[in-house]
Amino acid sequence: NIKLSCSIVTSLINSDEVFSTKEYRKKQFICLLINTAHAAIEKNHLVEARNFMDVVEILLPPQGWASWGFFIEYCSFKFLEGELKFVCGDETGKAQIMELIKHLSLLGQKKLSMRYQKYLNNLISCK
């Protein structure tokens, strides 16, 4: 249930505990935020999705997009599922990654969507 997931994540954000935790727990929470944002946007909960991605930006260190980039790519279930499908010859995987890139663009996450696009281009060129 996406509404329940969104409310749980929102209550975690509001607790402020996440902002004072160790880096490893922050990374786990970023995983949760990104995956919940993808689920929210698929169900047209754009406001929640945007809010979750805003918190991701707050939690990342100033150089976070560069230093945590590969971690962020691989914490997205939707991306990993799409990559696995595509590598195994299922073209729906490519469509799934392209949908993810579109979602991130809609949420104003240009850096992250460009990273996914670059990775998708690499996958395509390797085939």
Image (cartoon, grey):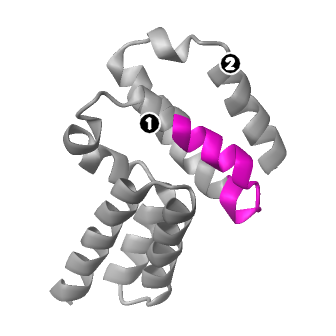
At 74% from the left edge and 40% from the top edge, which residue is drawn?
A: 5
Q: Which residues are magenta?
A: 40-54
Position of 94 with respect to 119 (left or right) is right
Q: Secondary structure at mark 1?
A: helix
Residue 32, numbered circle: none
Quarter residue 115 falls in:
bottom left
On the image, the x and y values in percent for residue 105 come to 49, 64
Q: CA distance from mark 1 to mark 2?
A: 16 Å
Compared to 17, does 43 lie above or below? below
Quarter residue 83 falls in:
bottom left
- The type of residue carrying mark 1 is Glu
Q: Secondary structure at mark 2?
A: helix
Compared to 92, does 71 lie above or below? above
At 53% from the left edge and 74% from the top edge, which residue is drawn?
A: 99
On the image, the x and y values in percent for residue 73 come to 35, 54
Q: Which residue is mark 2?
A: 14
The prevailing secondary structure element of the residues shown in magenta is helix
- Count residues near mark 1 (Cα–Cα under 10 Å), then give few for <14, some for 14-19, many for 20+: some
Compared to 110, does 26 lie above or below? above
Position of 39 with respect to 28 (left or right) is right
Residue 57, numbered circle: 1
Instruction: Give the quarter of the figure containing the C terminus.
Output: bottom left
Q: Give the mark nearer the N terminus: 1 vs 2.
A: 2
At 21% from the left edge and 44% from the top edge, which residue is drawn?
A: 66
Nearer to us in this view, 80 or 117: 117
Compared to 43, does 125 lie above or below? below
On the image, the x and y values in percent for residue 53 come to 54, 43
